[in-house]
Image (cartoon, rainbow, N blue to C red):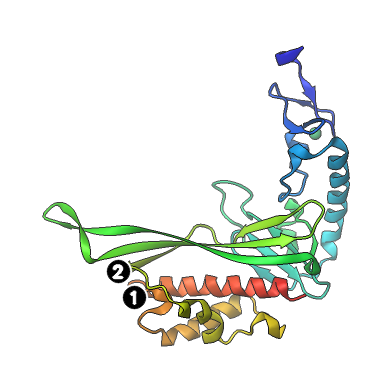
Amino acid sequence: MGLFNKKNCAICNEKVGLLGGLKLKDGHLCKECKNKLSPFFTERKESTIEDVKKQLEYREENYKLLDKLEINKIYGEFGVILIDEKNKKFVAVRDTGGGLFSNPKKVTSIDDVKDQNPDIIDLKDVEDVEVKIIQTNREEKQTVNGQQVSYNPKHYTYMIGFNIIIKVKHPYIKEMRIDIKSGTVQIYNEGLRKQDDYIAGFVKDKLGLKRVENKAVHYDNLTIHNLVEKAMQVMPDYSYGFKCSLKNYDRIKEYAYYLALCDEIRSSLLNK
Ligand SMILES: [Zn+2]
């Protein structure tokens, strides 16, 4: 009875710990069985044993189909998105390192992420793709007579992260949030960053990438990198709102690269 009554996993019947494992609506699940569910599945607590059994069957089937994919586009360096344009399918992996404190893995084929059994999704089931640029900043100070004082104007380091949020029509997944870079791009700036509408349109227009409505050819990581390299040779004084100097040139270029990459991922996923 009660506290010391060990429970069993509803799927594999293994004993789950004193704390009763992971809750389902009508039973418990062990950690190993939970790890076989879709990594983007968030409704475990509301699921019945029957729901989980069905999902595990689907997941086994999914694993077998991974070999059939003909991946021709791979995006991202932490979380990754792999696209099969011929069969109009994609898979996404949240973390190629497979957990906290592990280094992201370089992904060059589906084999590199097969161990995570990423769900195969039809491009036609993509409902929306949102690019989320997350920016924070901290003030940088100088030491004058042993005191920390502000610069005039104030200097800041900007930290910028790049997330892709893919909303899908799928029995087990609603939304996939992919952080395409490990950590943030950090840009030192003399003064506050200038915000203007010009920034938003810059990538596509300056780089000459085709917009999604053109349903054009899409570019891979390397092509975008080369395009950014070329465009940055004519970088204006306030590229992307940052005051350019030799000190932050490479970082602004890195920022431009990830911005272009995000835009390209969005176009590719919406190109049904
Ligand atoms: Zn189990």
In the displayed structure image, the side of residue 72 where residue 185 appears, left or right: left
Q: From what the image shows, is residue 126 above or below residue 196?
A: above
Q: Is residue 217 visible?
A: no
The quarter holding residue 271 reads bottom right
Residue wearing tag 1: 243
Asked whether 228 or 53 is in front, the reply is: 53
Q: Is residue 263 visible?
A: yes
Q: Please, which residue is most extreme toward the front here?
A: 197
Residue shown at the point (70%, 85%) measured from the top left:
214
Secondary element at image label 2: loop
x and y percent of residue 73 in the render?
70, 72
- N-term mark: 2 or 1: 2
Q: Which mark is residue 89?
A: none
Residue shown at the point (34%, 75%) measured from the top left:
243
The quarter holding residue 193 reads bottom left
Q: Could you tell me which quadrant the C terminus lies in?
A: bottom right
x and y percent of residue 219 in the render?
65, 79
x and y percent of residue 140 in the render?
28, 59
Q: Tell me the kind of residue under disc 2.
A: Gly
The quarter holding residue 195 reads bottom left
Q: Which quarter is ligand 1 in?
A: top right
State yes or no: discs 2 and 1 in contact (Cβ < 8 Å). yes
Q: Could you tell me which quadrant the N terminus lies in?
A: top right
> How many residues crowd mark 2 within 10 Å: few (<14), some (14–19), many (20+)?
some
x and y percent of residue 143 in the render?
18, 56
Asked whether 118 or 132 is in front, the reply is: 132
In the displayed structure image, the side of residue 59 where residue 247 appears, left or right: left
> How many residues crowd mark 1 within 10 Å: few (<14), some (14–19), many (20+)?
some
Q: Which mark is residue 191?
A: 2
Secondary element at image label 1: loop
Disc 2 from disc 1: Cα separation:
8 Å
